[in-house]
Image (cartoon, rainbow, N blue to C red):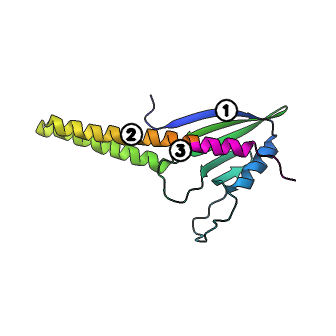
Amino acid sequence: MRIFPKYSEVLVSACSNEEVERKLLAVTKRVNYLDRSNAANEPYLFNGQVNGDRFYLSLIINKADSFLPLIRGRVEPLKTGSILYLSYSLFPSSMFFLAFWGLVTLGAALLFIIMEQEWLYAAACLAAGAGNFAFAWSYFKRKLKQSQQIFHQMLSLQEKD
């Protein structure tokens, strides 16, 4: 059983590696965090990096979202297309947040049990920690479906001449 949400999938595409890379580059904005300009009219779907056969993407969003999936992918050639290996996970900062608060609630529960013998407070701390993880998993699954749908649609886009 995993502590942090993660999902993997393998996609087979009729597009060559170069076509997949071209499609990814067309919808991926390389983020410059020092640039404050608002590019609302740009046709990008993802923030991230595309480096040849590897890429790192996340959906472009308008407001902060701690549980948005980070898509890590690798493209390998086939005779008549390509195969994409995708891994969806939380961003490292979100995993740190979950781990930190999980340890804080576990530590508080242990303190209540060992120092005070307050089983109700300890149970409340454990429930809060478990609730935090349950919320993260459920929200990640919802955002995962949204990211997958947009990524799959992007791959099936017809080439524009």
Towards the viewer: 136 or 89 = 136
Residue 12 location (% of width, % of height): 74, 33
| Residue that appears at 83% across and 48% down | 159
Towards the viewer: 43 or 50 = 43
**Disc 3 versus disc 2: nearer the observer:** 3
Q: Is residue 148 magenta?
A: yes
The answer to which of marks 1 and 2 sits earlier in the sequence is 1
Residue 87 horizontal side relative to residue 158, left or right: left
Q: Is residue 110 above or below residue 150?
A: above
Task: Tell me whether circle 1 and circle 3 mark residues in contact (CB < 8 Å).
Answer: no
Quarter of the figure that contains the N terminus: top left
| Residue that appears at 53% across and 44% down | 143
Give the residue number, with chain letter if any, for mark 3: 143
Residue segment shown in magenta: 146-161
Gap in Å between the C-alphas at discs 1 and 3? 18 Å
Give the residue number, with chain letter if any, for mark 2: 133
Label tally: 3
Task: Tell me whether circle 1 and circle 2 mark residues in contact (CB < 8 Å).
Answer: no
Task: Tell me whether circle 3 and circle 2 mark residues in contact (CB < 8 Å).
Answer: no
Amino acid carrying mark 1 in the image: Val
Residue 101 location (% of width, % of height): 34, 46
Towards the viewer: 13 or 105 = 13
Residue 89 seen? no
In the picture, the disc for residue 10 is 1
Q: Main secondary structure of the magenta part?
A: helix
Residue 116 location (% of width, % of height): 11, 39
